[in-house]
Image (cartoon, grey):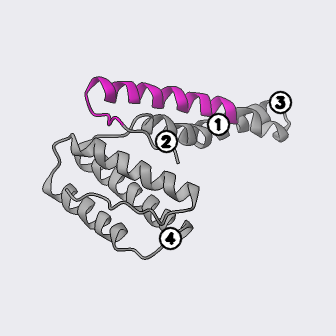
Amino acid sequence: MKTLTQRPDITHPKTAALYKQLSDLLNALSQRALTPEIVALIDHEIDHINYANDTGKKLGKTVKAAESKIIKAVEKELKVVPRNHYRKLWAIFGFTAFGLPIGVTIGLLLKNIGLLGVGLPFGMIIGLLVGSSMDKKAAVEGRQLDFEVKH
């Protein structure tokens, strides 16, 4: 697996943080057994970033896109995820899939549809609980990377 080249020309703080985060992801993945397809995808994305002439926010977008693509491929092929991956995913899902129906139900029962937003926090809490339990299960099964997406 290829490595990222050091880029002292990165002056934008968020881009520097994204670049370091991608480097941390690659370090966490280097400790795992990866399929040749995953290694080829990672090498392609690293080449794309290493040879990019971009700096600043445009480079940050390129780095973030590469990180997302790598994480999705690793999750799909190897069922390995970063820490708190499911919690973040299910918080949003719970907000919309559980929170809206709960809010609509409360609003209709009390004949005040303005109470629609009351169900959203309940849905988010449900999503956080489901996602946290899935993250714990992934950790117990050894399917969790020693890495967390923060940016």
Residue 99, which numbered label? 1
Q: Tell me residue 144's x, y (percent).
A: 32, 34
Q: Which element carries disc 1, helix, strand or loop?
A: helix
Q: Write down the residue under mark 3.
A: 110
Q: Which element carries disc 2, helix, strand or loop?
A: helix
Q: Which amino acid does the dot numbered 3 rest on?
A: Leu
In the picture shown, does residue 113 fall above or below 53? above
Q: Residue at x 36, y 51 (%)?
A: 23
Q: Tell me residue 9's x, y (percent).
A: 48, 66
10 Å crowding of disc 1: few (<14), some (14-19), many (20+): many
Q: Nearer the observer, disc 4 or disc 3?
A: 4
Q: CA distance from mark 1 to mark 2?
A: 15 Å
Q: Nearer the observer, disc 1 or disc 4?
A: 4
Mark 1 near mark 2, Cβ–Cβ under 8 Å?
Answer: no
Mark 3 near mark 2, Cβ–Cβ under 8 Å?
Answer: no
Q: Which amino acid does the dot numbered 4 rest on?
A: Thr
Q: Write down the residue under mark 4.
A: 55
